[in-house]
């Protein structure tokens, strides 16, 4: 697992209970992240998102232990309780399907605002971009060049991956299975395809990520009153549990089956 890594810079986006087959409780999960931070060298740094309560708590604990920390998020400078911070100003949707914003930080200059224009959808990618810019700044590399590169990034495979469109149906493959990941994917779909009907199958990718295995309830079904005539279908692959020896298979789900 990730405790076998030897990080110099560690980015923690959020901490929520997941993979209950490995971490039975949230406390077990949080303890693993604390052990991960302990792997950082003295001259390394923890970059943590303060928009997430658990990641913020982890950062505060690391700071008290003397580790170098950098906070990032959508909050204002006054709420980023850290000596080093990176934040986004003026977050707004753009015509590319992502968001435009200005990155400001005391890592380079508090008076300088670096414009960023993303095509990767979702506000969570604004937060991810802030983390990337923070690490780039820590490494002494030019953040403006990094911002340009982020604008060219289209996203990772199976993370809101647009497979195609036919007869007005946009097919998106997203592996997110945790309730927060599902909410983020649905929010990204609504932002990228405003006014369209959003559908998703009610299946889970693995046995260990079933609703019974996750303490928080999954997002409720989308109200038909919020649908329009043009659909956007979000499909997720169905995989066996990690512990199984059976070959991996996928289910083919047609657009009508997702309604």
Image (cartoon, helix red, strand yellow):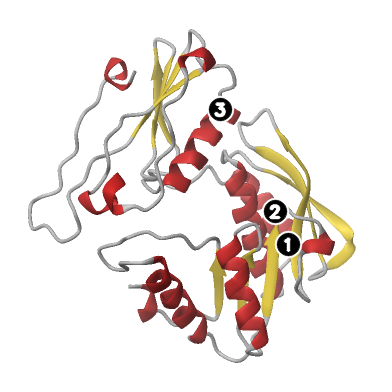
Count of numbered circles on the image:
3
Percent position of residue 152, x then y: 60, 45
| Depicted 123 relative to depicted 170: above or below | below
The residue that label 2 is drawn on is 147
Q: Which residue is at a point 41% across and 66% down the rendered structure image?
A: 26
Residue that label 3 marks: 190
Q: Are marks 2 and 1 in contact (CB under 8 Å)?
A: yes
Q: Give the labeled residue for mark 1.
A: 143
Residue 182 in the image: state x and y as whole percent.
Answer: 44, 41
Q: Nearer the viewer, residue 73 or 22?
A: 22
Of residues 175 and 183, the one drawn nearer to the viewer in this rendering: 183
Q: Residues within 10 Å of mark 1 (few under 14, many from 20)?
A: many
Q: Residue at x 37, y 28 (%)?
A: 200
Rendered residue at 75%/73% (across/down): 82
Mark 3 and mark 2: span between their CA atoms? 25 Å
Q: Categorize mark 2 by other alpha carbons within 10 Å: few (<14), some (14-19), many (20+).
A: many
User: Which quarter shows the N terminus?
Assistant: bottom left
Q: Is residue 83 left or right of residue 183?
A: right
> Residue reaching furthest right?
111
Where residue 117 sits, quadrant-wise, is top right
Separation of marks 2 and 1 at Cα, in angstroms: 6 Å
- Dot 3 or dot 2: first in sequence order is 2
The residue closer to the viewer here, 188 or 211, is: 211
Indicate which label's residue lies in the foreground, 3 or 2.
3
């Amino acid at each position: 697992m990730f405790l076998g890594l030897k990080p110099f810079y560690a980015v923690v986006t959020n901490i929520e209970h997941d993979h209950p087959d490995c971490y039975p409780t949230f406390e077990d999960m949080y303890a693993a992240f604390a052990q991960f931070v302990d792997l950082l060298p003295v001259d390394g740094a923890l970059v943590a998102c303060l928009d997430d309560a658990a990641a913020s708590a982890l950062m505060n604990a690391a700071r008290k232990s003397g580790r170098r920390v950098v906070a990032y998020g959508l909050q204002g400078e006054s709420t980023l309780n850290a000596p080093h911070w990176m934040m986004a100003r003026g977050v707004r949707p753009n015509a590319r399907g992502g968001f435009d914003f200005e990155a400001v930080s005391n890592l380079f200059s508090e008076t300088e605002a670096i414009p960023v224009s993303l095509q990767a959808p979702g506000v969570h990618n604004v937060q991810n971009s802030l983390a990337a810019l923070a690490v780039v700044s820590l490494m002494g590399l030019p953040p403006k060049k990094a911002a340009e590169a982020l604008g060219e990034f289209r996203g990772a495979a199976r993370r809101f991956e647009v497979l195609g469109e036919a007869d007005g149906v946009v097919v998106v493959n997203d592996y997110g299975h945790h309730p927060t990941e599902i909410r983020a994917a649905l929010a990204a779909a609504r932002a990228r395809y405003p006014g369209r009907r959003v559908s998703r199958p009610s299946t889970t990718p693995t046995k260990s990520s079933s609703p019974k295995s996750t303490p928080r309830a999954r997002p409720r079904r989308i109200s038909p009153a919020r649908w329009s005539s043009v659909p956007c279908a979000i499909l997720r692959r169905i995989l066996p549990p990690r512990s199984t020896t059976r070959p991996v298979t996928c289910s083919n789900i047609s657009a009508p089956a997702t309604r």
